[in-house]
Image (cartoon, rainbow, N blue to C red):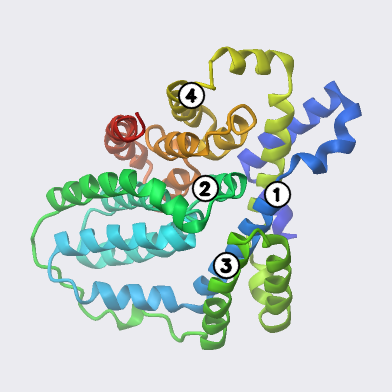
Amino acid sequence: MRLLRNLRADTFFLVLLAGLVLLSLADPSRMASYPALVDWPTMAALTGLLVLTKGLEVSGAMHWLGHRLIGLMATERAAAVWLVIAAALLSTVLTNDVALFVVVPLTLGVCRITHMPATRLIVFEALAVNAGSALTPIGNPQNIFLWQLSHVSFGEFMLQMLPLVALLMAVLLVLTAFAFSSRPIHMGDDKKHLPVRIDRPLLWISLALYLPFLVATDMHHAPSAVLVVLLIFMAFRARVLAILDWGLLLVFVLMFIDLRLLASLGIVRDTLQGLGLDQALNLYLTSMAASQIISNVPAAIALADYADNWRVIAYGVNIGGFGFMVGSLANLIALRLSADRKAWLVFHAYSIPFLVLGAAFGYAILF
């Protein structure tokens, strides 16, 4: 079975599973309460977004549009800037991971034709999706979780994150312009790289359901909304559900259970309480530091049990996506897709300074 094969090869899943086994052996009496540890509205929102974005991806429309846009670019600098902008914009609505799955394969194809530096461009796209996805409640998993937890509106969430994202994107675009030359770009005959066809019914189904699903989720009806989405896709395009990354959803379920079990342990509780997380600055610094160790999604889930200042946590964990490559799952995806063994060196050369810069921006905005 494809799902089982993928899970056996997923190191992060195996670590989470091993952690669950150890925690269960340590206290078997808590096993009955495991379902209550999962934030099911967040899981419903994530599931619906995965289905709808997979529908857009499978339809071929995004790749077709990307190739058309690149064909309009005159220089390497213009192509790089627009690809970085596209990655950031896509991440605000398709999530940072999905944006990379759309943009990086396109980037590799373009760089093979134009001989642009692929690794550097992919690193900039990883930075772009980390920055861009911070803007919206649906841009990344930690925002989905914090949005559901905060009960603020879609617009209010964006308004709070806008200053940080604007500053980060401004710096990134200036850096991109300096990092790529103004040499004319020659695409050659690119027709063979275009998708053979677009699955228009699938495209329209995905687009038609996207806004209603967001509205329903904003009104805290994500479980009902995802049921409707699943039934429609099951009836009209069951193959999308068959190739969906169900393993990713299982990883998030395990993360909720493992981290909340760990957070309830006496030694962990005493340590976190000793950090003074009721103080906004301590919470901010801890959110960034924890992201560098356990990634920003688990950090958001763990810290939410000890502090209710969602805005400070959101700033901390989104900025924490920069720095070391484990800070965000999107970083690992980008480096894996680049197929360059030395990509992590290039990534850290840019990402660690971005962590420092983002931390300074976040401090200035929050405090």
Mark 1 lies on a secondary structure that is helix
Q: From the viewer's perspective, is the residue at label 3 or at label 4 nearer?
A: 3
Circle 2: residue type: Asn
Q: Name the residue under label 4.
A: 286
Q: Is residue 336 above or below residue 200?
A: above
Q: Name the residue under label 2.
A: 143
The residue under the point 55% across, 49% down is: 147
Circle 3: residue type: Val
Q: Label 3 vs label 2: CA separation?
A: 16 Å
- Disc 4 crowd rating (10 Å Cα; few below 14, some 14-19, many 20+) is many
Q: In which quarter of the image is residue 181?
A: bottom left
Q: Mark 3 points at which residue?
A: 215
Q: Name the residue under label 1.
A: 250
Circle 1: residue type: Leu
The quadrant of the image that shows the N terminus is bottom right
Mark 2 lies on a secondary structure that is helix
Q: How many labels does the image show?
A: 4
Q: Cβ–Cβ below 8 Å for labels 3 and 1?
A: no
Q: From the viewer's perspective, is the residue at label 1 or at label 4 nearer?
A: 4
The residue under the point 23% across, 53% down is: 117
Q: Cβ–Cβ below 8 Å for labels 1 and 4?
A: no
